Amino acid sequence: MYNIRDLTLGEYLEKIAEPSFPGPASGSACATAVAMASALVEMSCKASIKKDPQNQMLIDATEKMKKLKAHCLYLADDDMRAFGEVIKGTRKKKEFPDQYEDLLQKATDPLVAILEGCELILVEIQGIQKESYVKVLGDLAGAVYLSEGAAIAVKKAIEVNLTYLSDTAYIKRVRETVERLYDNCSKIKNNVINEMFD
């Protein structure tokens, strides 16, 4: 089994285009989008630090984004493997429904973590935008919209997974978490964009 982070971009796109599992699909693509958004914020912080080398907020945000970027690439792998297990488990869903339920929950958890990454990026951008060099605001806006797109897509993927589950406590907990995270992402995104381009 390969790791997504070890592939070239071209190889990764070819793997996404192949309908063979385990292989990267929408969850992995969302995780990668969040990793790219993290990289844009990291770059924006580094460019801004050149103008203000002692700015601790930007220094801290750089480190957070560096860690999130790596974490999201691991989440892309986690999603690929978990989704592959669900595909394999589908054949025995009727025979082993509890096992299938467990596989589907394990495939949903990385999606929730990806949505948490979207929120983290938006929170950081909200904190640093006024500290950032004016020439990187377009890049920060790009990170905002990448995060928003990933949040929309991953929220839908989670909702689809939940329709196949029967564990009501798990469903309730995940729905509440997803609604809170997604609502916060939407709110922050609107605030950031309005402030950025006022």
Image (cartoon, rainbow, N blue to C red):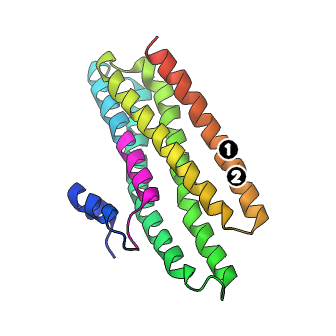
Q: On the rendered structure, is 69 left or right of 98? A: left
Q: Residue at x 54, y 48 (%)?
A: 115
Q: On the rendered structure, is 60 left or right of 45? A: right
Above or below: residue 172 compared with residue 54: below
Quarter assignment of residue 183 = top right
The residue indicated by pointer 1 is 179
Q: On the rendered structure, is 29 left or right of 94? A: left
Which span of residues is magenta-colored?
21-37
Residue 102 is tagged as none
Callout 1–callout 2 Cβ contact below 8 Å: yes
Q: Residue at x 58, y 68 (%)?
A: 106
The answer to whether residue 117 is seen in the rendering is no
Q: 102 or 159: nearer the eye?
A: 159
Above or below: residue 90 compared with residue 132: below
Give the CA separation, mark 1 to mark 2: 6 Å
The residue indicated by pointer 2 is 175
Instruction: Name the chief secondary structure element in magenta.
Output: helix
Counting every numbered tag in the picture gives: 2
Residue 32 included in the magenta stretch of the image: yes
Above or below: residue 154 compared with residue 104: above
Residue placed furthest toward the bottom: 95
Q: Residue at x 43, y 47 (%)?
A: 68
Amino acid type shown at disc 1: Glu
Amino acid type shown at disc 2: Arg
Label 2: state its secondary structure: helix
Label 1: state its secondary structure: helix
Residue placed furthest toward the top: 198
**Classed neighbour count for the residue bearing mark 1: other residues with Cα under 10 Å, few (<14), some (14–19), many (≥20):** few
Residue 98 included in the magenta stretch of the image: no
Quarter assignment of residue 40 = top left
The x and y percentages for residue 103 are: 59, 74
The x and y percentages for residue 127 are: 50, 26
